[in-house]
């Protein structure tokens, strides 16, 4: 009799363990991958100097986001060879500016044709507002950055917008920086530039 009771308890325990495992597996959320829409996404740059500012665009070349519950991970690349200026209308002056930005004084595009950003953490601050940290690589130099972004997620699309301030001198871009050169006067260029990001990613099929 005792033996039968022990066997019955063992079978019941095994059944409960199996059922528990089944429930755990079936309640587990599946991660969703979203591919960055290279046409709809945009990245505007703004660089300031004593006498004014320059504005332009640069293209995102690839990227993806993975969403699992409130967890968001991902990365994207920036094609620095695509950099343009939208504020300089004279063709010759525009070409001179872009050529300078692509030179070793700034982004050394021939040697380093792309920049990249990899997400480290994404933390919900309040509705649709997230604190993001990650690693930005420019000219082969990687530094951590942090910024606030507005992120909206639905079944098919992730939309993220942010204005990100970058200290160019941390990436060996020191041209006319008052941190490294004196007596620049009105030729000085701000250390910081802004990336105005609009990232749209669509659910992978």
Image: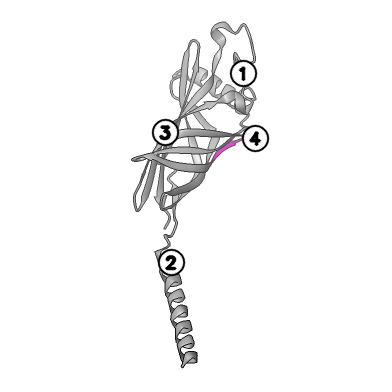
Vertical order, 86 against 22 (above or below): above
As helix, strand or loop, the secondary structure at mark 1 comes to loop
Residue occupying the point 63% across, 9% down: 182
What is the count of numbered marks? 4
Report the disc number at residue 140. 4
Residue occupying the point 43% across, 20% down: 87
Identify the residue position indicated by label 3 in the image.
162
Vertical order, 130 against 93 (above or below): below
Mark 3: give few (<14), some (14-19) or many (20+) Cα within 10 Å: some
As helix, strand or loop, the secondary structure at mark 2 comes to helix
For marks 1 and 4, the one nearer the N-term is 4
Report the disc number at residue 24. 2
Tell whether 145 sits left or right of 196: right
Q: Position of residue 185 (x, y in %)?
A: 57, 6
Of circles 4 and 3, the one toward us is 3
Report the disc number at residue 175. 1
């Amino acid at each position: 009799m005792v033996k039968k009771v022990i066997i019955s308890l063992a079978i019941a325990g095994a059944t409960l363990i199996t059922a528990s495992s089944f429930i755990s597996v079936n309640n587990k959320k599946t991660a969703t991958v979203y591919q960055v829409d290279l046409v709809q996404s945009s990245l505007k740059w703004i660089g300031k100097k004593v006498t004014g500012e320059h504005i332009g665009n640069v293209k995102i070349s690839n990227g993806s986001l993975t969403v699992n519950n409130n967890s968001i991970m991902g990365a994207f690349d920036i094609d620095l060879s695509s950099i343009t200026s939208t504020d300089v209308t004279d063709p010759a002056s525009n070409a001179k500016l872009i050529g300078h930005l692509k030179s070793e004084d700034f982004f050394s595009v021939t040697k380093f044709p792309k920049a990249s950003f990899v997400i480290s953490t994404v933390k919900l601050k309040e509705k649709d507002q997230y604190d993001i940290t990650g690693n930005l690589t420019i000219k082969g130099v990687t530094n951590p950055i942090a910024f606030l972004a507005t992120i909206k997620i639905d079944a098919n699309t992730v939309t993220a917008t942010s204005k990100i301030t970058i200290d160019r001198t941390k990436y060996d871009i020191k041209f006319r920086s008052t941190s490294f050169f004196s007596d620049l006067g009105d030729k000085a260029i701000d250390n910081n530039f802004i990336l105005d990001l609009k990232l749209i990613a669509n659910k992978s099929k």
